[in-house]
């Protein structure tokens, strides 16, 4: 590597983790976010001559990353969670539903992506509203994807990244009035979204985890104790299962669903590996096809807690997430 190239990438290296998180929030996909940050660094190197002031490296990089994401969003459908795209289903087992393309669903991201990401206090606008953990919860990412791409970018650059109004307008090639208007509409929409069904989940998922409840929850799965599992359900529990466009709402419906599902799946052998995703505890489910078979990763199961109960279960049945989470495909 040439000296100039090495010096450039050494200068941008401290921002890499933050840029990856930004791309993840923009795109709603850990795979796409990882690709977008790579593309951002390539574009930045090629456009290095346009950086007139090295002290403006941070907003310059975010401008490139944001526009790379906006270009990508023109090619792809809007991502969502199942509970944002359909009505809850009748939990009769087995379910008569088919998976949708994975590209339409928001993906989880590993908490390891937050390592090394630190806000720059000198660069932050006083209007920044969301902490690092809050800004990666599934509730917040889902709320972002209700917005238009331009509104999403405006809110992220102002309220999460901490760019000024002027820097945000420049990044999006907007006049200041248009940028402020987009921010106002985006804030209003996201606040309404988080103030509804996800409010408790959003607040608690970014806070402390009930470790005793988590241990009991894992033990219930490992021991196939369906009654204890159901006893932990919050009365308003929601279970979603991307890539299936299906979700189950309420403790009674979830109890019926889990009894049928677990009777069918736990008999073949299941092992759980603890991990973390989107500032919440997560379980990597490994299951055998037959009693003599190999334990293969089947799902990343992200858990939300509220009032000492299990309030949200986002069961991502997407084995390709193993690579993103640094997990083996088989045990």
Image (spheres, grey):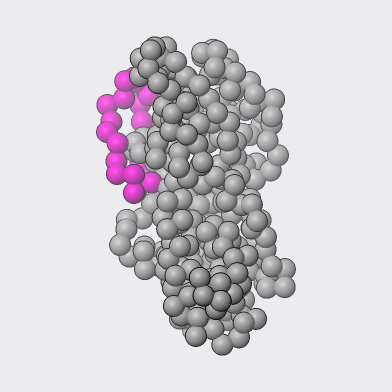
Please tell me whether residue 220 is drawn above or below residue 25 in the rendered image: above
Please tell me whether residue 269 is drawn above or below residue 206 in the rendered image: above
- Residue at image position (65%, 41%) is 204
Based on the picture, tell me whether residue 319 belongs to the magenta stretch. no
Find the magenta span and give its range.
85-105
User: Which residue occupies the extreme bottom position in the image?
Assistant: 52
Q: Is residue 134 shown left or right of residue 299?
A: right
Q: Position of residue 248 (x, y in %)?
A: 42, 30
Quarter occupied by residue 260: top left
Residue 75 visible in the displayed image: yes
The residue nearer to you, when weighing 73 against 191, is 73
Please tell me whether residue 33 is drawn above or below residue 68 in the rendered image: above
- Residue at image position (43%, 48%) is 106
Residue 87 visible in the displayed image: no
Main secondary structure along the magenta-highlighted residues: loop
Please tell me whether residue 73 is drawn above or below residue 240 in the rendered image: below
The residue nearer to you, when weighing 46 against 170, is 46
- Residue at image position (64%, 24%) is 215
């Amino acid at each position: 590597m040439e000296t100039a190239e090495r010096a450039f990438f050494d200068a941008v290296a401290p921002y890499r983790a933050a840029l990856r998180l930004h791309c993840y929030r923009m795109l709603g996909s850990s795979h796409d976010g990882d690709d977008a940050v790579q593309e951002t660094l390539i574009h930045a190197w090629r456009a290095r001559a346009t950086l007139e002031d090295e002290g403006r490296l941070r907003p310059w990089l975010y401008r490139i990353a944001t526009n790379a994401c906006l270009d990508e969003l023109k090619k792809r459908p809007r991502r969502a969670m199942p509970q944002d795209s359909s009505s809850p289903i009748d939990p009769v087992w087995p379910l008569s539903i088919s998976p949708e393309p994975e590209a339409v669903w928001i993906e989880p991201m590993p908490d390891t992506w937050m390592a090394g990401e630190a806000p720059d206090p000198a660069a932050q606008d006083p209007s920044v509203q969301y902490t690092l953990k809050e800004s990666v919860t599934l509730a917040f990412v889902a709320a972002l994807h209700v917005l238009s791409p331009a509104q999403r970018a405006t809110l992220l650059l102002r309220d999460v990244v901490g760019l000024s109004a002027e820097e945000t307008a420049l990044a999006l090639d907007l006049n200041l009035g248009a940028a402020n208007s987009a921010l106002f509409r985006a804030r209003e929409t996201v606040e309404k979204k988080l103030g509804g069904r996800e409010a408790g989940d959003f607040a608690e998922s970014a806070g402390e985890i009930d470790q005793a409840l988590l241990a009991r929850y894992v033990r219930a799965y490992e021991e196939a104790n369906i009654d204890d599992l159901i006893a932990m359900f919050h009365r308003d529990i929601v279970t979603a299962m991307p890539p299936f466009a299906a979700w189950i709402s309420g403790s009674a419906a979830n109890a019926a669903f889990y009894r049928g599902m677990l009777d069918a799946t736990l008999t073949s052998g299941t092992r759980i590996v603890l991990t973390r995703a989107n500032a919440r505890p997560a379980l990597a489910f490994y299951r055998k096809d037959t009693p003599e078979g190999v334990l293969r990763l089947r799902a990343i199961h992200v858990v939300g807690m509220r009032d000492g109960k299990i309030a949200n279960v986002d069961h991502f049945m997407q084995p390709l997430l193993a690579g993103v989470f640094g997990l083996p495909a088989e045990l």
